[in-house]
Image (spheres, rainbow, N blue to C red):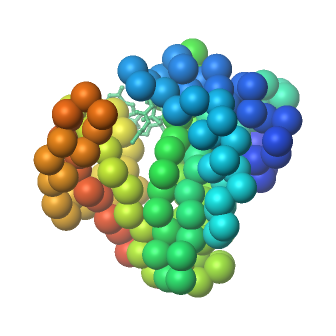
Amino acid sequence: MFEIREMEPGDLDGICRIECASFSTPWAKVMLAAAMRFSGSLNFVCERDGILAGYVFSRLTGTELHIINTAVEPSMRRQGVGTRLLRFLTDKARDKGALWAYLEVRKNNLAAIRLYQKHGFGIVDTIPGYYEDGSDAYLMAAAVGKRD
Ligand SMILES: CC(C)(COP(=O)(O)OP(=O)(O)OC[C@H]1O[C@@H](n2cnc3c(N)ncnc32)[C@H](O)[C@@H]1OP(=O)(O)O)[C@@H](O)C(=O)NCCC(=O)NCCS
């Protein structure tokens, strides 16, 4: 059974492993540790039977939720973990006064773009050269202030 809970410092090593398995330019451990402590951070993990399945980092500033980073353990993908994390996060953020959520995603990351679109996000802009390797990003946004 999958369960979602607030991220804790003890999750760092597991997050680091999933991060490295998920991105060509993963965040360093020190960056992940720093993101755990950002002011306004809303960070959650998903576990299955005590095993870390995925995580999401975000930051709430006023009424805007910035989803900074999310990934799911490769062997546990396509089982609804990303969906559960996103839904849990937006529910929590709404309770704290969020009206909007936004994020950046690589233009060629179809899995993530579909996940976000299913959750009501739309592409609102393109950010040329957003990533270190020069790749472009889509800026995606959704209203989270009202339930569907
Ligand atoms: C993107 C990611 C978080 C999705 O996590 P997940 O747990 O597999 O997602 P879900 O099982 O909740 O899938 C929800 C929907 O997203 C879409 N989706 C997910 N993976 C997909 C894939 N490989 N190809 C196409 N669509 C996909 C589908 O519409 C899916 O619904 P469906 O299974 O009913 O068709 C995961 O693939 C991942 O960790 N990728 C690497 C890290 C990453 O890219 N993070 C996002 C950075 S912006």
Location of residue 102 (image quadrant): bottom left
Left or right of residue 78: residue 92: right
In this view, 128 is above or below 54: below
Residue 146: x %, y % from top left? 47, 81
Question: Residue 148: in sight, yes or no?
Answer: no
Left or right of residue 95: residue 125: left
Question: Residue 17: in sight, yes or no?
Answer: yes
Which of 72 and 118 lies nearest the eye of the viewer? 72
Location of residue 123 (image quadrant): bottom left
Residue 57: x %, y % from top left? 59, 50
Where does ligand 1 appear, by image quarter?
top left
User: At 46% from the left edge and 75% from the top edge, which residue is drawn?
Assistant: 64
User: At 63% from the left edge and 39% from the top edge, which residue is drawn?
Assistant: 32
Count of residue discs = 0
User: At 33% from the left edge and 51% from the top edge, which residue is drawn?
Assistant: 104
In this view, 66 is above or below 20: below
Residue 77: x %, y % from top left? 51, 25
Query: Quadrant where the C terminus lies?
Result: bottom left
Which of 7 and 30 lies nearest the eye of the viewer? 30
Location of residue 51 (image quadrant): top right
